[in-house]
Structure formats: structure tokens, C-alpha cells
Image (cartoon, rainbow, N blue to C red):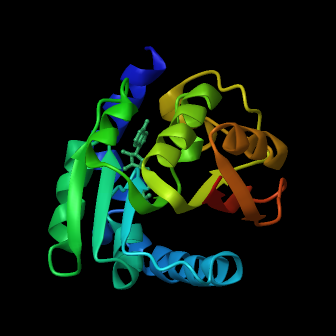
Amino acid sequence: MPVYESAMKLWNDRKVISKSAHWKASGHWKRIIPTVRKRWVQMKGRNAPERIVQTMVEYGSGGGAVASALAPFFTRIYGIDISELSLEEATKQLKAETFFVPVLIDIENPESALRIGPQDVFISTAVFQHLPSRDYARRVLLLGRRLVRDDGLALIQFRTGYSSAPKGNYKRRYAKWNCQSHKEFDEDARMAGWWVAEMSPEHPTRSGYTWAFMRAL
Ligand SMILES: C[S@@+](CC[C@H](N)C(=O)[O-])C[C@H]1O[C@@H](n2cnc3c(N)ncnc32)[C@H](O)[C@@H]1O
């Protein structure tokens, strides 16, 4: 099955995503909320303390855990996703917490999210490793740059330590389908118009989860 089709099937399968897209009932919220909040506060504090931010756009918002973690810092949050079910779930969970705007995209055309216009911050966590290819990740970096103002910021978590040439069965390998080294991510981010102000250390023998804090060039 072509990768776009496999990804659409997986991320719209309620049984899989109620856990893998970090829905509240899965228990992932408890772990994600303090981790993401701490990352945001520390990395922004070190790299853009002067920047006042109000709106954020999250790429691959899943069940809404990250939006919930960052709700205290923003007046409006846009959640972009290819999964209608996850967007519905996030909308339900975030109703009482923040002004959340669901943005459904077609996997073949993530650029359709440009309809929301430029915001202050672009965030994506636990998504880049699931993207169809490095080329697709480059498109998302470019999209992110176009979705923020000229003094925009970004926080992206990607995965290192595995081959950047995905192959095999997406359903079995989606957790590390698209991985990049620090150098590859930095090159791609620069080409898309970002300056990587800080990257967390690479742990190739462990999960390989890496966080990048970026400023628009
Ligand atoms: C593991 S969940 C992460 C959810 C959330 N970012 C978090 O950290 O809790 C991955 C999310 O990415 C979405 N996703 C997968 N492929 C995508 C793509 N090509 N474009 C946009 N979203 C995608 C999935 O539907 C899912 O909601």
C-alpha cells in the first residue's frame, strides 16, 4: 500500500489513535503535559525571552495534549492534522481550556493549512518521525515558516538515530519512519528559512527524541 494511503488509514483508525495519537484516556497526557511545558518555558526563556507571543499553530495536534500543555501561554491555538477523529477529540478536550481551532488537511496537500494565515509560533512534537519522507518533512518546515510572522518562533521534536530512508511497512514502522541527524535537520530547517537557536543533545542509542527551538530568519 502506498505510504500516504497507509498513513491515512492508520491515523484514522480509532483503535490505534486513541493510544498512538495521545488521546487523554490513554494516559499519555500525564507524561506529555509537564514535559512539553518545561521544554517550552526553558527553551523560549533561553532563546527568545523578549518575544511576546499570543497565537500558536500545532502541526499534528493529535488528541490535544500539547495544546493543553501550552494553553496557558496562548490566546488561540490552531491544530492541524490529517485525522478528523483526532481533531474532534482535541476540540472536545480543549473546549474548556483554550480557543482551539481545528484545521483538517489532506495528507497530499499540507500547504492547504496556509489558509489560517501567519501566527506567532509553530509547534510540532511526535510527528516528524511519522511523516512520509524527508522531502515531506522539508515541506512541513517550509509550511511552518510560512505559518509564522517574520519574528516567529518554532519548537519541533524530531527523531534521530535511525536511517533517514524509510522502507517496509508503514503500519509496523511508523514510530521511526522518518528520522534525521542533527546535521540533516539543521540543513533542512535553514533551507526553509529557520535559524536553529538550540537543539537538545542527540541520544542515538536511546529514543533519539531531539528538540529544536528555532527563530524565523
Ligand atoms: C503521535 S501523535 C502526536 C500528537 C501530539 N503532537 C502530541 O505530541 O501529543 C501524531 C499525530 O500526527 C498526525 N499526523 C501523522 N501524519 C501527519 C501528516 N502527514 N500531516 C499532519 N499530521 C500528521 C497524526 O494524525 C497524529 O495526530
Question: Is 16 positioned to the left or the right of 198 in the image?
Answer: left
Residue drawn at point x = 34 percent, y = 30 percent = 8
In this image, 40 relative to 106: left or right? right
The image shows residue 178 at horizontal and vertical percentages of: 63, 36
In-front residue for pair 33/185: 185
- In this rendering, the answer to whether 18 lies above or below 39 is above
Q: Quadrant of residue 128?
A: top right
Left or right: 216 as drawn, with respect to 10: right
Most extreme residue toward the front, as rendered?
150
Residue 174 % position (x, y): 54, 38
Q: Is residue 209 visible?
A: no
Which residue corresponds to the image point at 68% horizontal and 44% vertical from the top-left?
189
Q: Residue at x 58, y 36 (%)?
A: 137
Residue 23 visible (yes or no): yes
- Compared across the picture, whether 143 is left or right of 19 comes to right
Depth check, front residue: 118 or 183: 118
In the image, residue 16 above or below residue 68 = above
Q: Is residue 148 above or below residue 10?
A: below
The answer to which of 39 and 191 lies nearer the viewer is: 191
Where the N terminus falls, by quadrant?
A: top left
When asked about the image quadrant of residue 99, the answer is bottom left
Residue 108 placement (x, y as % from top left): 37, 23
Rendered residue at 61%/21% (across/down): 168
